Amino acid sequence: MSPRGVAIEGLRERLFAAAERVLARDGAAALTSRAVTEEAGCSKGVLHTHFTGLDEFVADLVLHRFAEAAGLSEDLPARAGAGSVEENLTDVASAVLSLDPGLVGLAVTRPAAAQRVREAWAGGAPGFAAIQDAIGRYLRAEQELGRVAVPLDVETVALALVGTLHHLLMTGSPDAGPESHAHVGRLVRALIRTE
């Protein structure tokens, strides 16, 4: 247990990781401020010292994890011409599908957290829109290189892929990973024509 009044390095990430362990092990109903701080090995009040409450904490956790996934898609356009188009798209999809469906579902079931996430995304926080944009830019770059057919409507493909990822996250379970990845692989092959 961390002593009171001592700054804890990497506290946010430590609390976020603890919350994800609680969710994975015990489910959404078990996620409380106390459960998170106990799992993180912190004093009981530390979560409320840094967040106004559990809703803000959950929203920030969701936004943080989506920013990480979106960050992995940022370099996608620079990968044009390297590897296969299918592999590059499925790599980004895998990063998004690595998010815990329980966490995403939790944010939706907590109205204040859901509102905070929606407002942050509307204000430009990285999320599905950033991933969709990166996929569209990547596919346009691949069109310029001749690796993707020119008549392909890249914006629609990007929307279809991100929409599928959204659906799989919202309806999936933590053990649905292999099945979700298989769905994405089939979708990518159906949407694009590569060399």
Image (cartoon, rainbow, N blue to C red):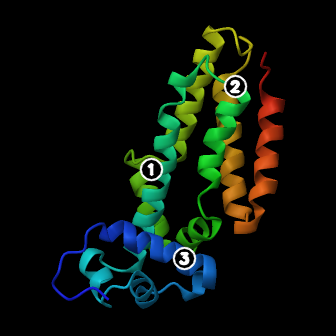
Amino acid beneath label 3: Arg
Callout 2: SS: helix
Of 190 and 5, nearer the camera is 5
> Which of pointers 3 and 1 lies earlier in the amino acid sequence?
3
Q: Looking at the image, which residue sits at the far left?
A: 5
Q: Which residue in the protein does label 2 denote?
A: 85
> Which residue appears at 63% of the width and 16% of the height?
142
Question: Quadrant of the rendered structure where residue 124 is?
Answer: top left
> Which residue appears at 61% of the width and 64% of the height?
100
Rounded to the nearest whole Å, what is the CA distance between mark 2 and mark 1? Answer: 23 Å
Locate the N terminus by quadrant: bottom left
> Which residue appears at 44% of the width and 65% of the height?
61
Q: Which label lies toward us, 2 or 1?
A: 2
How many neighbours does mark 2 have within 10 angstroms: few (below 14), some (14-19), or many (20 or more)? Answer: many
> Which of pointers 2 and 1 lies earlier in the amino acid sequence?
1
Task: Residue 78 in the image: state x and y as whole percent.
Answer: 50, 23
Of 168 and 120, nearer the camera is 168
Callout 1: SS: helix
Residue 13 higher or lower than 81, as above or below:
below
Question: Quadrant of the rendered structure where residue 63 is?
Answer: bottom left
Task: Residue 40 in the image: state x and y as whole percent.
Answer: 40, 81
Locate the C terminus by quadrant: top right
> So how many labels did they put on this image?
3
Mark number, residue 21 = 3
